[in-house]
C-alpha cells in the first residue's frame, strides 16, 4: 500500500511540475496572446490594453494559481486565438490522435509478437536472422524518413492511399481507415522493430528458466512452449514500452501528423505555440501529462497482474 | 513597368506557395462581386504578415486592383443552371474568426461572401461602390456626413430586422474594435434617424467611405446574435446573405445551407449546399481535386502553370487574378537602411526576373509599386530601381569605405519551404554585391510580427493588403503618421499628396496626387515591391459563377456559384 | 541485459563472422563521417552557392546527389551537414550523460525522499511535451546549434538518469556496499570505488545508442522547422526542404535521408555489438 501511495503522490507531483514548467516556459516567450489576437495591425498601446484586459500583467504565481484553480474545477479556459473552450478543442483532437496511436500499436504488436515468438522458437534460424536484421534496420530509420518513402511509393507513385486527406471516423469508417492506414503504418514500423527485439530477447531469457524446462521435458514442441508458456511472463518489458509509447504519443506525433496533415494533438500544439495561444498549450500539456501518469499507473497495475512478484521491485521510473 | 522589383516578388511567389498564403493574401472581400450583386468587400484593414494564416488581417479588393483573366472551355455555351446540387471547395485554411471586427483571413472572407451582405458592393467591372443593403448613400453638402438609407424589409437569418440601429451597432463595433478601428477612424459618430436611415459623421471629408462600406466594415450581422453568442461570436455568423452557416466541423469542413428567405429575389441561392474543406497543403488540395473530392480549390503557386493549361484545353475551369504585391519592409530608422543608397542598392541587387523564372515557373508579374497594371491607380513609370548589380556593388563599396564596414543586416522571414527558398536565393544575390546578410527564419509568426510592430528588425517580409481605396493603404503605410508605418518612412511631399487624396472628391485629381505619392515612394524605396501575387481558382467543368472580372483574390464568390446542366 | 545478449551470441554461432564484417563496415562508415565532417571545408563545391537555374536537377556524374530547390549541390550539403549531426550528437549526449548520470546516481544511492523527489522530477521531464520545450526555447533563444543541443541534451537527461539509477540501486544492495555504509564509510569514496564502476558500463553503452537517438531527434526537429538555423546546413533541414517536392524531385529528400538512416544504423550496430559481444562494456562493467 505504501508503494502505491508513494507512487500516486509522485504522479501528482509530476502533474504539478509539468504544468508549472510549461507555464514558466510560455511566460518567457517574447510577446503574448495579445499579439496573436491583434495581429499585424497592432500598435503598442493596444497591445498593452489587451494585456491588461487579459490580466497578463499579474505576477506569475498569481496567474499560475488562477490557472490551476480553474483547471482543478474542470475549466481549461478559452483559446485566445480561436476563441473557443480549450476543452472542446482538445476533445476534437483526441479521437484523431487516439485512433492513430491505437492503430499503430495494434499494427506494431500484430507484427512484433508472432515474429519475435517464431524467432525465439528457433533462434539462429534463417527466419530469426532475417527478422533480426530487418528489425535492426527499421529501428534505425527515422519515422519521418519512413513516412516520406511510404508517401512516395504508395501515395505519389502508386496512388494507393491518399497523402493528405483526413475523414472523421464518424463520417465514413472506410474512408477514415483508408486515410489512417498510411500514417499508422509509418508509426508502427519503427515500433514493431523495437518490440520484436525486446520481446525476442525476453523470450529467450524465459526459455532458460526451470518451468519452461519442465514443460519441454513433457515433450512439448519448442514453438508451442514459446506461445503457451513463455509469452506471458516475457511480456513485462514489452508492456512497459507499449505503455510508455502510448503515453508519449497521445501528446501527438508531430512529425507524422505534419507529414500526413492529420488534425491531431501534435498539430494543435504546433499551431498554438507560435500563435501564443497559452491556454491551449497549457491544456494540451496537462492532457499529455495526465495521459502519461495514467498510463504509468496502468503499467504498474499490469505488471503486478502479469507477475505478482514485481510489487517488491522498485517501480520502473 | 520595371523589370525587376525587389525581393517582394519572390515573396509573393512563395507566399502563394506556402499554405499560409491563403490568409494573408486575400484580396477580396466578402461579398465580392458578382454580376449579381454580391457585396463587396474591401476592407480597410491593415497589414498582414506575410504568411501567417492565423494572424492576417484581411483585405479585400481594391477597386480595380486586380487583373483577372479566365480561361474557359472553348466549347461552353452560356451555362444553364441546374437545380440545386452541392459544391465542395478546397480552401487553403479554415476561417480564423467569423467576427467581421477581428483579424479575418481569406477563408473567413469566403464565408462572409455567402452568408453576410455589406452596405455597399463593388461593381464588378468598374469597381465603383454601389448600394447593396443600402438603398442609397449620400454625402452632405459640408462633406462631413453621409446618410445611409436602407432597403426595407430585410431580415437577418435569426428573423430580426436589418434597421438603422443595426447599422449603428455594426459600425460602432468596428470603431471600438482593437483590430479594425483604424479602418473607420474618420467616422466619429453614427446617428440613427429612423428605422431605415442612419447618418455617419466624420471629422474631415473622406472620399473613401463608400468603398470602405463595401468592405468588412460594411458587413451587417445581427445585433441580437452578438448579444446571444457572447464569447462564441467568432464561431458563428448570422447575416442576411443567400446562405446560412450550417455545421462547422473544426479543421474538417464547414457547410453552408441556402437561406430561402433571401431578400434579393433576383439572385437566390442556387445550391442545396456549399461545403468548404480546409486543406493547408498545396499538393494536398490539388490531389483532392484530382481525386474529385473537391469541386474547386485554391491553386497553389507551383500548380498555376499546369492548371492554366488544363483550363485552356477545356478540361477544367480556371481563373487567375493578379493581386496585391508582397513586399519587404526596410527599417528606415536603422543602419544600414537609414541610408537611402543601401535601400536602392538592395533592390538593384535583386534579380527578380530570375526569381520568377526559377522559383515560380515564370508565373509572376514584377511590381514597380503598390498597384498592378490593371488597377486604375497603377503608375507605369514610378522610378522604382531596376536590376543593376554593378551600380549596387558600387553603392555598397562606397558605403563600406565611408563607414569602415560592409552593410550588414538581418532578414526576417517565416520558415515555410517556399519562403525559405526565396529567402535563400535573395541572400545569395544580396551577398553577391557585398551585403552581409543573416537570415532569421522562424516558425514563430508572432515573433516576426512583434518585431516589426516594435521596430526591432532590419528588414522583414510583409504583405500589403488590398484595400478598398488607395487612401487607406497608402495613407496608413506611407504617411509619416500612418498607423501602419512600421518602416518609419517620412516624406513631406508624399504626406501632402496623401492628405489631398483623402479629401479631394475629384477622381482625376486623385489619380494625379496618388501617382505623385507613388513616384515619391518608389524612388525613396522605403519598402521593396516584389511581384504581384497571382492567385488561381480552379473548378471542374459544370461549376459556374466564377468568371473573369468577378474574382479578386483567393476567395471564391461562393454566393454566386452554381452547377450547370451540362458538365 | 548482458546475460541476455551473451545468450544471443551463443544461440547464433554462425552470426559471429557476419557480425565481424558488418561491425567493421559500421565502424568504417562512422570513421568516414568524422573525417568528412572535419575535412568538409576542403570540399571543392560550396554547399551554400546556389545555381537557381539548375534547381531540383536530378543526380548527375559531377553532382551525384543532384541539386536542391535553390540549385545547391546536395552532396556538398550532406557533407557539411555531418558536422552538425556529429557536434549535436556528441554534446547532447555529454549533457545527458553528465546531468542524468549524476541525478540517477544520487537518487539510487540516497533513496527514500531524495529518490522520490528526483524520480518525480525525471518523470515530469518525461511527461513534458518535447515539442513545447523545443518550440518555446527556439522562440526565446533563436535557432542555433547551441539551442538544439541544449534542448536535446535536456531530453536525454531522464533516460540516462534511469539507467544510472537502476545500476546504482543494484550495486547499493550488495553486501560489501551495505557493510561499508553501515561502518560509516564516506559516501564520496563508496560511490567512487564501489558504485561508479557498476554504473559506468551501462551508461557508456547507452551513450552510444543515445548518440543515434540524438541524431534522429535533431533530424526530426529540423524537419519540422525548429532545428538549427537555416544558415547552418543540417541533414534534417535538407530532408525537410525536399519534402514538398517528393513528386518532382524525390532525390532532394532521399539522399540525405539515406545518409542519416545509415548513420543511425551504424551507430546502433556498433552500440549493440559492443553490448552484446560483451567485449568493451562488460569489461568496464565488471572491473
Image (cartoon, coloured by chain):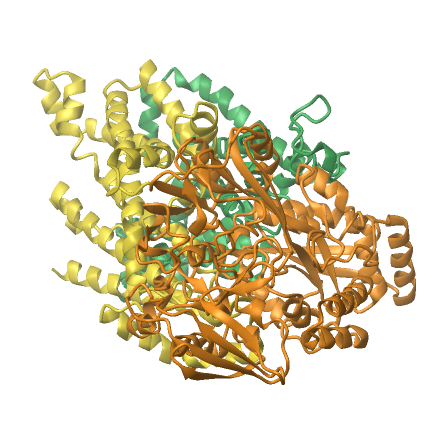
Q: Residue at x 59, y 57 (%)?
A: B50
Relative placement, left or right, of B518 versus B475 is: right
User: Where is residue B147 shown, x and y percent of the image?
Assistant: 51, 78
Relative placement, left or right, of B283 versus A260 is: right
Relative placement, left or right, of C47 versus B72 is: right
From the viewer's side, name the closer residue of B196 and B340.
B196
On screen, residue A196 above or below C121: above
From the viewer's side, name the closer residue of A104 and A39.
A39
User: Where is residue B411 shown, x and y percent of the image?
Assistant: 69, 58
Counting the numbered discs, the total is 0
Q: Which chain is yellow?
A: A
Q: Residue at x 41, y 34 (%)?
A: C275
Quadrant containing the N terminus of chain A is bottom left
* Residue B35 appears in the picture as rendered: yes
Q: Quadrant of residue B451?
A: bottom right
On screen, residue A62 above or below C124: below
Q: Colour of chain C?
A: green
Q: Quadrant of residue B404?
A: bottom right
From the viewer's side, name the closer residue of B421 and B489.
B489
Q: Which chain is orange?
A: B
* Residue B336 appears in the picture as rendered: no
Q: Residue at x 16, y 63 (%)?
A: A5
User: Where is residue A60 shown, x and y percent of the image?
Assistant: 41, 78
User: Where is residue B60 shown, x and y percent of the image?
Assistant: 55, 60
From the viewer's side, name the closer residue of A288 and A160.
A160
Amino acid at each position: 500500500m505504501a508503494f502505491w501511495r508513494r507512487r500516486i503522490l509522485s504522479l501528482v507531483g509530476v502533474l504539478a511540475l509539468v504544468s508549472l514548467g510549461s507555464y514558466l516556459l510560455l511566460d518567457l516567450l517574447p510577446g503574448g496572446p495579445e499579439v496573436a489576437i491583434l495581429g499585424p495591425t497592432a500598435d503598442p498601446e493596444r497591445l498593452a490594453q489587451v494585456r491588461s484586459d487579459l490580466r497578463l500583467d499579474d505576477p506569475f504565481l498569481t496567474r499560475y494559481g488562477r490557472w490551476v484553480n480553474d483547471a482543478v474545477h474542470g475549466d481549461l479556459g478559452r483559446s485566445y486565438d480561436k476563441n473557443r473552450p480549450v476543452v472542446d478543442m482538445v476533445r476534437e483532437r483526441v479521437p484523431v490522435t487516439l485512433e492513430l496511436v491505437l492503430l499503430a500499436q495494434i499494427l506494431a504488436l500484430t507484427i512484433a509478437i508472432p515474429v519475435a515468438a517464431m524467432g525465439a522458437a528457433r533462434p539462429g534460424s534463417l527466419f530469426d536472422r532475417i527478422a533480426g536484421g530487418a528489425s535492426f534496420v527499421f529501428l534505425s530509420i527515422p519515422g519521418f524518413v519512413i513516412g516520406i518513402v511510404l508517401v512516395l511509393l504508395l501515395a505519389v507513385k502508386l496512388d494507393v492511399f491518399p497523402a493528405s486527406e483526413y475523414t472523421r471516423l464518424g463520417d465514413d469508417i472506410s474512408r477514415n481507415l483508408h486515410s489512417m492506414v498510411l500514417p499508422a503504418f509509418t508509426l508502427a514500423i519503427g515500433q514493431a522493430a523495437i518490440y520484436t527485439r525486446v520481446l525476442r530477447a525476453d523470450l529467450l531469457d524465459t526459455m532458460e528458466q526451470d518451468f519452461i524446462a519442465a514443460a519441454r521435458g513433457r515433450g512439448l514442441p519448442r514453438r508451442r512452449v514459446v506461445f503457451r508458456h513463455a509469452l506471458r511472463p516475457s511480456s513485462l518489458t514489452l508492456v512497459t514500452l507499449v505503455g510508455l509509447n502510448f503515453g508519449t504519443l497521445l501528446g501527438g506525433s508531430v512529425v507524422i501528423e505534419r507529414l500526413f496533415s492529420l488534425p491531431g494533438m501534435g498539430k494543435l500544439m504546433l499551431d498554438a505555440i507560435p500563435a501564443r495561444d497559452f491556454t491551449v498549450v497549457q491544456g494540451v500539456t496537462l492532457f499529455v501529462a495526465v495521459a502519461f501518469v495514467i498510463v504509468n499507473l496502468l503499467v504498474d497495475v499490469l505488471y503486478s497482474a502479469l507477475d505478482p512478484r514485481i510489487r517488491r521491485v522498485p517501480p520502473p521510473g | 513597368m520595371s523589370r525587376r522589383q525587389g525581393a517582394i516578388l519572390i515573396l509573393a511567389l512563395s507566399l502563394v506557395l506556402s499554405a499560409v498564403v491563403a490568409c494573408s493574401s486575400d484580396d477580396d472581400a466578402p461579398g465580392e462581386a458578382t454580376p449579381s450583386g454580391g457585396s463587396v468587400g474591401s476592407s480597410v484593414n491593415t497589414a498582414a504578415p506575410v504568411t501567417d494564416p492565423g494572424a492576417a488581417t484581411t483585405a479585400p479588393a481594391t477597386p480595380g486592383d486586380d487583373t483577372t483573366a479566365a480561361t474557359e472551355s472553348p466549347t461552353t455555351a452560356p451555362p444553364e443552371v441546374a437545380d440545386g446540387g452541392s459544391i465542395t471547395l478546397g480552401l487553403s485554411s479554415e476561417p480564423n474568426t467569423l467576427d467581421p471586427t477581428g483579424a479575418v483571413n481569406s477563408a473567413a472572407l469566403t464565408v462572409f461572401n455567402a452568408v453576410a451582405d455589406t452596405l455597399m458592393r463593388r461593381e464588378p467591372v468598374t469597381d465603383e461602390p454601389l448600394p447593396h443593403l443600402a438603398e442609397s448613400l449620400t454625402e452632405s453638402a459640408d462633406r462631413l456626413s453621409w446618410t445611409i438609407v436602407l432597403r426595407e424589409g430585410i431580415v437577418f437569418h435569426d428573423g430580426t430586422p436589418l434597421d438603422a440601429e443595426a447599422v449603428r451597432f455594426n459600425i460602432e463595433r468596428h470603431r471600438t474594435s482593437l483590430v479594425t478601428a483604424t479602418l473607420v477612424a474618420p467616422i466619429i459618430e453614427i446617428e440613427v434617424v429612423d428605422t431605415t436611415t442612419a447618418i455617419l459623421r466624420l471629422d474631415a471629408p473622406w472620399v473613401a467611405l463608400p468603398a470602405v462600406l463595401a468592405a468588412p466594415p460594411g458587413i451587417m450581422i445581427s445585433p441580437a446574435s452578438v448579444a446571444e453568442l457572447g464569447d462564441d461570436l467568432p464561431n458563428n455568423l448570422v447575416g442576411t446573405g443567400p446562405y446560412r452557416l450550417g455545421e462547422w466541423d473544426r479543421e474538417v469542413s464547414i457547410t453552408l445551407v441556402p437561406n430561402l428567405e433571401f431578400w434579393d429575389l433576383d439572385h437566390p441561392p442556387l445550391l442545396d449546399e456549399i461545403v468548404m474543406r480546409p486543406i493547408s497543403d498545396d499538393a494536398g488540395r490539388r490531389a483532392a481535386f484530382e481525386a474529385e473530392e473537391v469541386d474547386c480549390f485554391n491553386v497553389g503557386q507551383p500548380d498555376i502553370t499546369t492548371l492554366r493549361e488544363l483550363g485552356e484545353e477545356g478540361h477544367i475551369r480556371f481563373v487567375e487574378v493578379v493581386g496585391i504585391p508582397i513586399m519587404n519592409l526596410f527599417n528606415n530608422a536603422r543602419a544600414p537602411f537609414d541610408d537611402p543608397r543601401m535601400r536602392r542598392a538592395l533592390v538593384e541587387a535583386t534579380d527578380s526576373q530570375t526569381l520568377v523564372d526559377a522559383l515560380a515557373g515564370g508565373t509572376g508579374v514584377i511590381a514597380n509599386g503598390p498597384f498592378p497594371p490593371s488597377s486604375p491607380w497603377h503608375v507605369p513609370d514610378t522610378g522604382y530601381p531596376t536590376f543593376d548589380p554593378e551600380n549596387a556593388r558600387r553603392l555598397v563599396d562606397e558605403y563600406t569605405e565611408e563607414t569602415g564596414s560592409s552593410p550588414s543586416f538581418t532578414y526576417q522571414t517565416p520558415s515555410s519551404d517556399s519562403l525559405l527558398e526565396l529567402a535563400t536565393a535573395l541572400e545569395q544575390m544580396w551577398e553577391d554585391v557585398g551585403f552581409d546578410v543573416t537570415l532569421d527564419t522562424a516558425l514563430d509568426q508572432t515573433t516576426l510580427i512583434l518585431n516589426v510592430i516594435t521596430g526591432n528588425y532590419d528588414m522583414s517580409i510583409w504583405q500589403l493588403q488590398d484595400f478598398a481605396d488607395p487612401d487607406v493603404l497608402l495613407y496608413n503605410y506611407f504617411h509619416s503618421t500612418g498607423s501602419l508605418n512600421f518602416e518609419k518612412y517620412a516624406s513631406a511631399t508624399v504626406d501632402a499628396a496623401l492628405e489631398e487624396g483623402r479629401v479631394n472628391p475629384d477622381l482625376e485629381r486623385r489619380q494625379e496626387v496618388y501617382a505623385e505619392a507613388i513616384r515619391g515612394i518608389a524612388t525613396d524605396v522605403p519598402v521593396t515591391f516584389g511581384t504581384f501575387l497571382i492567385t488561381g481558382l480552379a473548378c471542374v467543368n459544370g461549376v459556374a459563377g466564377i468568371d473573369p472580372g468577378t474574382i479578386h483574390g483567393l476567395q471564391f464568390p461562393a454566393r454566386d456559384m452554381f452547377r450547370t446542366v451540362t458538365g | 541485459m548482458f546475460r541476455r545478449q551473451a545468450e544471443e551470441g551463443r544461440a547464433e554461432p554462425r552470426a559471429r563472422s557476419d557480425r565481424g564484417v558488418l561491425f567493421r563496415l559500421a565502424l568504417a562508415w562512422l570513421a568516414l563521417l568524422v573525417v568528412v565532417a572535419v575535412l568538409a571545408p576542403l570540399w571543392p563545391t560550396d554547399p551554400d552557392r546556389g545555381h537557381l537555374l539548375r534547381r531540383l536537377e536530378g543526380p548527375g556524374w559531377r553532382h551525384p546527389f543532384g541539386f536542391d530547390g535553390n540549385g545547391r549541390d546536395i552532396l556538398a550539403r550532406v557533407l557539411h551537414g555531418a558536422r552538425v549531426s556529429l557536434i549535436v550528437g556528441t554534446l547532447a549526449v555529454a549533457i545527458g550523460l553528465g546531468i542524468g548520470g549524476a541525478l540517477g546516481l544520487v537518487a539510487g544511492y540516497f533513496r527514500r525522499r531524495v529518490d522520490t523527489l528526483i524520480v518525480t522530477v525525471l518523470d515530469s521531464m518525461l511527461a513534458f511535451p518535447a515539442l513545447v520545450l523545443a518550440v518555446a526555447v527556439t522562440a526565446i533563444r533563436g535557432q542555433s546549434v547551441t539551442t538544439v543541443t541544449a534542448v536535446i541534451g535536456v531530453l536525454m537527461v531522464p533516460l540516462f538518469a534511469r539507467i544510472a539509477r537502476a545500476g546504482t540501486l543494484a550495486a547499493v544492495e550488495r553486501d560489501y556496499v551495505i557493510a561499508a555504509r553501515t561502518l560509516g564509510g564516506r559516501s564520496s569514496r563508496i560511490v567512487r570505488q564501489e558504485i561508479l564502476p557498476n554504473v559506468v558500463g551501462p551508461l557508456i553503452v547507452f551513450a552510444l545508442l543515445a548518440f543515434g537517438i540524438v541524431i534522429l531527434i535533431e533530424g526530426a526537429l529540423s524537419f519540422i522547422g525548429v532545428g538549427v538555423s537555416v544558415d547552418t546546413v543540417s541533414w534534417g533541414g535538407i530532408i525537410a526542404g525536399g519534402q514538398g517536392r517528393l513528386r518532382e524531385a524525390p532525390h532532394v529528400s532521399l539522399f540525405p535521408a539515406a545518409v542519416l538512416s545509415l548513420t543511425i544504423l551504424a551507430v546502433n550496430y556498433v552500440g549493440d555489438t559492443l553490448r552484446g559481444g560483451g567485449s568493451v562494456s562488460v569489461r568496464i562493467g565488471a572491473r
